[in-house]
Image (cartoon, rainbow, N blue to C red):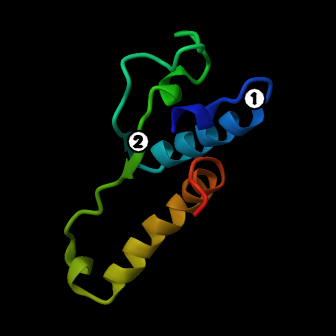
Amino acid sequence: MTGAFERPGDPGPGRRPVTIIRNLERDGFTITGDLLKRPLRGHRADHPRANLLRHKSLIATRPVGCDEWIHTPAAADHVLAAFTQLRPLSHWLLKNVAQPR
């Protein structure tokens, strides 16, 4: 997965997830995942996207709490709203990381 964040001579694809992740974090999501100790070989430790280049997996979570809405039909709307916010990240991952079947 780490190689998808940077392709030699093509800095474009790696910039988009930085913006997406920044927006998700601003909206209360936490980004975690399995990390390498350092970026992939061939990438400097001070690379602008060094943190992303360490990811072997990428997990975005946001607590939704257990307010009263959790027991109502509105719960589906709350969960759908979170999934909708994750759509840009999902699309980027599908385009740049997913293996074709």
What x and y, as percent, mark residue 98? 56, 53
Taking 22 as reference, is 48 above or below it?
above
Residue at horizontal 53 percent and vertical 42 percent from the top: 21
**To which residue does mark 2 refer?**
57
Q: Tag 1, which secondary structure?
A: loop
Looking at the picture, which amino acid does disc 1 mark?
Pro
Looking at the picture, which amino acid does disc 2 mark?
Ser
The answer to whether the residues at label 2 and label 1 have Cβ atoms under 8 Å apart is no
Tell me: 82 left or right of 61.
right
Residue at horizontal 47 percent and vertical 50 percent from the top: 27
What x and y, as percent, mark residue 44? 58, 10
Q: Tag 2, which secondary structure?
A: loop
Q: Residues within 10 Å of mark 2 (few under 14, many from 20)?
A: few
What x and y, as percent, mark residue 72? 26, 87
Residue at horizontal 44 percent and vertical 33 percent from the top: 55
Taking 98 as reference, is 58 above or below it?
above
Residue at horizontal 59 percent and vertical 46 percent from the top: 20
Taking 68 as reference, is 26 above or below it?
above
Looking at the image, the residue that sits furthest to the front is 101
Q: Nearer the viewer, residue 68 or 2?
A: 2
Query: What number is the disc on residue 91?
Result: none
**To which residue does mark 1 refer?**
11
